[in-house]
Image (cartoon, grey):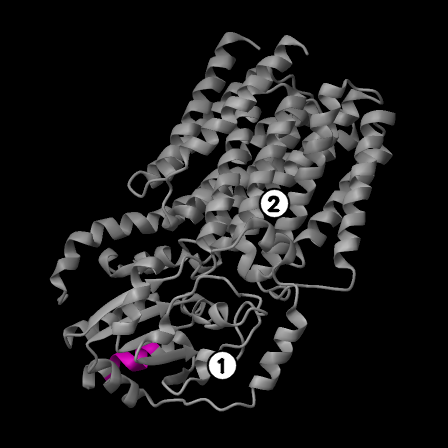
Amino acid sequence: MNLVIALAYLVAAVLFILGLKQLSSPKGARNGNFTAAAGMVIALLATFPLLSFTTAGKVIIVIGVIIGTLVGTVGARMVKMTAVPQMVALFNGVGGGAAALVAVAELLRFGAHPAFAQSFPSVFSIIIGSVSFAGSMVAFAKLQELMTGTPVTYPNQQVVNGLLAAAVLGFAIAVLAVASIPFSFIALMLLALILGVAFVLPIGGADMPVVISLLNACTGLAVAASGFTLNNFALIVAGTLVGASGSLLTKLMSDAMGRSIPNILFSSFGKVQTAVGGAATAQARSVRSGQVDDLATLLAYSRRVIIVPGYGLAVAQAQHAARELADALEKKGVEVSYAIHPVAGRMPGHMNVLLAEANVPYEQLKEMDQVNDEFKDADVALIVGANDVVNPAARSTPGSPIYGMPILNADQAKNVIFMKRSMRPGFAGIDNELMYEPKTIMFFGDAKDSLTKLVSAVKAA
Amino acid sequence: MSNELLNEFTFFILAIFVGFEVISKVPTILHTPLMSGTNAIHGVILVGAILIAAGANSPVTVILGLLAVILATTNVVGGFVVTDRMLEMFKGRQQTKPAAPGSTQPR
């Protein structure tokens, strides 16, 4: 590698590091993204002198870049803010897929008996890249609601997954120790893809953020491994940075949910059957549902209202309506704040982004630890499309799938208004006792419609 | 262990520490954008995809190369664009912040 290319790669690596640094503080975050993108451009430009093109090679690079740019731009531009989490899953998956394909191409080029220093990272990259690709696609399907968000479980699931993992390991050893032939490493890739699917299926939709973050870190490591195979500094450093920061971020995220990573990945939502059964029997119980005018009066004559926004608000694009309601209430002298659960929406920080889009003043957004003691002084907790994050079962029912998850103490408010489309259980697939409390009033309907109605009723009150 | 491998291994280990250190103080609200940003950075696999695609000389390598370049480019472009869209929202908030004190807030 000549000096100029090496230096350009070094510059790219520094830009990636600086970009990450800026991305982790609110002030510099957007610039951080540009810094990292600049690093990417430099890394790509520096690569071109290394290439010796065949005619076909030129053509496929041009076609591939055009298609990828179109798909990436259109996908990222068109997606609604509410659907961003699954888009991240998708973009992460394709990166893992690319890493696996690069490793396959390298193994093909090496022949049957490559040096261990080259075959090992290739095999690693194929396995991790494929798991990441397939796992991300399942995560995407769950979040996009192409398939059920509840955990998919079947008898002996752990055994099946264990056998799959053993088979992957077996083929990996075969490629490394016996012969690196296409049959072996294609089989390895297919098995790793199946393993990726099997790995994510039993994890509930509510835990997808942590899974996506973990797979993101995995893709980083697969990229780093490809860097070892190709002897490419940029891939090693950038891939490792993502692998390390992604692992830490995964831990920070699961900490924010009050869960451990193994708990999320392997054991958590194991007993879905009983939980779903519980929800079914609960349908018969009665709830109190209220009229717009009564609710508006209750709100307008409160001293303190805490709004608990959840995914339902996001889906209905109701963040602007929520802000209008808050404004109308403040005109009546009501103190309004928003209680943001760390995983409100679908990902940590997702709800803050949505409310920021609606220009909600920053001071009104309160994080869970900050706001939880304030609920007991609140006259009304207005729950807009949230469910699991206010489910007292997390505190009181050890058998519940969400037991142990930190929740917002909305049940401690003097009154609870629960805005929801229907009695359907939330993402975790379990019933919410709070809906049946005597102090709870249900207000059924689309979050945006309901809020808009409330706004005009409050103004009239 | 060859010299080159030793060098690569050194970078690898050092990058692990830098990766941990550099994001260790991230606030919760930036978890999603940061994940999306790191997601875009591992799109650097496009460098690898281009390296294998450039020399494609058989139907199999052409298909592998083409697929790898498409997937990796989608990762890079989509990753950075979607991260920017998220962070755009944060910028909007900071601009409107001075306007906020107009609302009454008994506290």
User: Residue B88 in the image: x percent, y percent?
Assistant: 34, 48
Residue corresponding to mark 2? A93
- Chain for mark 2? A
Dot 1 crowding, Cα within 10 Å, few <14, some 14–19, many 20+: few
Q: Tell me the quarter of the picture where residue A165 sits.
A: top right
- Chain for mark 1? A
SS assignment for the magenta stretch, majority: helix
Mark 1 residue type: Ser
Asked if marks 1 and 2 fall on the same chain, the answer is yes
Give the numbered dot on residue B45.
Answer: none
> Magenta residues?
A451-457
Q: Earlier in the sequence, mark 1 or mark 2?
A: 2
Q: Is residue A453 magenta?
A: yes
Residue corresponding to mark 1? A422
Q: Residue at x 48, y 36 (%)?
A: A245
Dot 2 crowding, Cα within 10 Å, few <14, some 14–19, many 20+: many
Mark 2 residue type: Gly
Quadrant location of the N terminus of chain A in the rendered image:
top right
Lateral position of residue B56 relative to residue A376, left or right: right
Q: What's the distance in space between the residues labelled 1 and 2, CA to CA?
A: 34 Å
- SS state under label 1: loop
